[in-house]
Image (cartoon, rainbow, N blue to C red):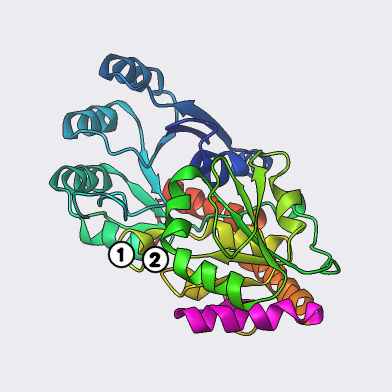
Amino acid sequence: MRVAALVESPEHVCARYRLRAFQAPLAQAGHTLEVHPLPTQWWGRLTLATSLRDADAVVLQRKLLSRPEVALLRRRVRRLWFDFDDAIWLRDSFSGNGFASRKRSGRFRAVVRAAEAVVAGNAYLAEHATCAGARAAWVIPTCVDVCRYPLARHDGGGVTLVWVGSSSTLRGLEAATPLLEAIGERVPGVRLKLICDRFVRFKSLPVIDRDWSEEREAVEIAAGDIGISWIPDDPWSRGKCGLKVLQYMAAGLPVVTNPVGVHAEMVRHGETGFLATTIDEWVNAISTLAVDSDLRRRLGAAGRRLVEDRYSLQAGAALWLNLIQGLTAGRASA
């Protein structure tokens, strides 16, 4: 089967983790997956839609096209599938105009109703797609290539917290400044490594800057001791797919995070890390892990096994292959 994907950019994190990562496993099963950047201008989209007529299926990723564009694309391709990994029918957590958007929600309804298959990064997203009129929605989580991540050693002095992300997601960490300051004040020897394209400073918590690069990302994560993630408890954040957490666990780091959305599914409290809501819970979790390298190593190993079982490329590829086989045979069920 020839599948063509339309993405914001082949280098965008969603295209890399949710589509390009599966090109090799799909090829081994006899399928081809081509990734194309979606033109920004409407006439470019007209031309591209025409050139995709020979594809057996076209995956539109995340982009909420206008109703006429969706209708045109649907008419010109054999099968239209839609893949997304955020609550894209809403504005994000830091929008000054609130979450609700008539334009976004209208376009979201149009694309999920036009698509033969909707692929969502988690159950929350799949449920909203179904409520918006999707015929059926399948959950395929964001997955990571576990082999890329060396295992953390947990044998250095002090304790290094790790956070990885981009400028946009760093705003969530900045919103958690009070709890990070408390950790810096109350946990001796703790420091925070930021792997990002922008950096922040805290009064009580020393920060180590590491410029993000695809080549060095996994090594920098594994050189830490504890992975952290904090997101606001709101409708947008509940649609997040937990990539940071998966990366930490793939590297054998125990994770401390707040129980919002998929965080509560991925992090098994006391087994792969700790779920913490209040400042005291965060400080206690970090303190417990900071003084016990054996505990960090044990929880980190359990997290790595969980990723291998449920969130690895092999696990994700199996879900994609089942979906493709079912849809082409006309018997797929969500």
Q: Label 2: state its secondary structure.
A: helix
Residue 301, compared with residue 108, is above or below; it is below
The question of residue 285 being in magenta is answered with yes
Instruction: Identify the residue shown where x is 75% and y is 72%.
Output: 301
Q: Is residue 23 visible?
A: yes
Residue closest to the eye, 269 or 291: 291
Q: Circle 2 sits on which residue? A: 123
Q: Label 1: state its secondary structure.
A: helix
Q: Position of residue 196 (x, y in %)?
A: 58, 45
What type is the residue that disc 1 sits on? Glu
Q: Is residue 245 shown left or right of residue 128?
A: right
Which mark, residue 127? 1
Q: Position of residue 107 (x, y in %)?
A: 20, 42
What residue range appears in magenta? 273-294
Residue 71, compared with residue 304, is above or below; it is above
Question: Do callouts 2 and 1 mark residues in contact (Cβ within 8 Å)?
Answer: yes
Which quarter of the figure is the C terminus placed in? bottom left
Residue 253, compared with residue 11, is above or below; it is below
Which mark, residue 215? none
